[in-house]
Amino acid sequence: MSTKTYEIRTFGCQMNVHDSERLAGMLEDAGYVRAAGGGETPADVVVFNTCAVRENADNRLYGTLGHMRPQKDINPDMQIAVGGCLAQKDRDTIVKKAPWVDVVFGTHNLGSLPTLLERARHNQEAEVEILESLDVFPSTLPARRDSAYSGWVSVSVGCNNTCTFCIVPSLRGKEKDRRPGEILSEVEALVSEGVLEVTLLGQNVNAYGVEFGDRFAFGKLLRSCGEIDGLERVRFTSPHPRDFTDDVIEAMAETPNVCPQLHMPLQSGSDRILKAMRRSYRSERFLDIVGKVRQAMPEAAITTDIIVGFPGETEEDFEATMDVVRRARFSSAFTFQYSKRPGTPAADMPDQLPKEVVQQRYDRLVALQNEISWDENKKIVGREVELLVAEGEGRKDAETHRLTGRARDGRLVHFTPTGALDGEIRPGDLVRTTITRAAPHHLVADTEITGHRRTRAGDHWEEGVRPKTSGVSLGLPSIGAPAPQPAAQQGCAC
């Protein structure tokens, strides 16, 4: 019997990307192998990990499933599975609209996928399993990581907020926190595999600790990450201004491997709109946090999310947002035009704005932010930076003969790979170079490299090795670097 192949197609946020790593780990543990990229022959199992937050998510999924039907007709043994947020929301609707789908599973039962595939194959009918709460915490599941040098680590799942534009809490559930020892063990497992950088993930990452009653737990976690040998960069996303405490800023500034970068969603600069959004802070509170971060870390890059055209937004409200953007001077911003999300309170609010008004305001905001981003990037010209060489982030690298990396503050830098080289530069290696030119969305370093450090992550990238981590589950909550674990619990480099 030949080995079955799998392919996972991921839509949406970092949470979904990390969930897909878990799905890949489970499928490989069940005997599947990843399908070769770009092959003409479709995989035996195709998994869609969906998002319900992005605009037209439903249409995109059903359109893609429609394209899959001819392949399914040609090869009835091929299996199609749909999971993630849209599956949690639509449930039985998916197999009614696309009866050629074999498995539907939700956000709370990722671990059921291999069993559901086998059951659907045996019973010759679709299997739909949607749970209302977690059956197992995702961290207890194995993960096949996508990157040799950078890894996601969840500190919590779910969200306790009630933002009127967001459907995530109803799809991901209430916040559930992992024990600190489990998080640190997973970080150590990744570092033991050569990973240099981790990003701590949570829907509201700085609310971490609410379940075990420690409002300072996230700052302690950052400091503990600083004690892990070999961990060179720590990032986190996304914090909520309501829960942002001074101890987190102190931990960021005082922990050398925590990067000088903060992504903190603003959403609106109008206090009236923030109230309508049920965002439990106001613009001055947001700016106060920005000011404290800049005081503690003058070089920090601060980025944000902004929604334009929320129901009832007036020109005065929009100008308040523009004012906060001018005062905050974000290095970049993810800007969105408000669109209805069925199932959210905002979808039923009066005074939904005409598309042309939203578009016009959106264009003005983008123009302002591009101007600010460019000005802020120009300040970095002439500065030497350390770059973690990235894979696939420079779309024009082949034609410009450059490579691309991320600075410690998260900025994207395209650089010329000449100078003090220690052999070939690989993704996962570290280089030092000097910025020569700025653009709104990236920096350029067209000067010789002054330093190049080959890393184990670069070795693994060159060898085609990607980390495989086992599920982590330890004892009672604790904080600090974990005790050494046997190799079997640290994961392996297979």
Image: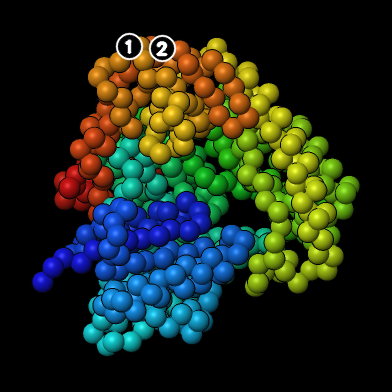
> Is 223 on the left or on the right of 271, as rendered?
left
Reading the image, the residue beneath label 2 is 448
Toward the viewer: 249 or 232?
Answer: 232
Reading the image, the residue beneath label 1 is 420
> Is 27 on the left or on the right of 263, as rendered?
left
Residue for point 76% across, 72% down: 348
Mark 2 to mark 1 CA distance (whole Å): 7 Å
Q: Secondary structure at mark 1?
A: loop
Query: Residue 227, located in which quarter of the rendered image?
Result: top left
> Is 158 on the left or on the right of 460, as rendered?
right
Q: Position of residue 91 (x, y in %)?
A: 49, 79
> Is 223 on the left or on the right of 443, as rendered?
left
Q: Is residue 32 visible?
A: yes
Q: Position of residue 173 (x, y in %)?
A: 52, 67
Q: Is residue 483 visible?
A: no
Q: Is residue 49 depicted above or below 405 in this figure?
A: below
Query: Residue 248, located in which quarter of the rendered image?
Result: top right
Q: Secondary structure at mark 2?
A: loop
Amino acid type, label 2: Glu
Disc 2 crowd, CA 10 A, few/some/many (<14, 14-19, 20+): some
Amino acid type, label 1: Ala
Nearer the N terminus, badge 2 or badge 1?
A: 1
Residue for point 39% across, 48% down: 153
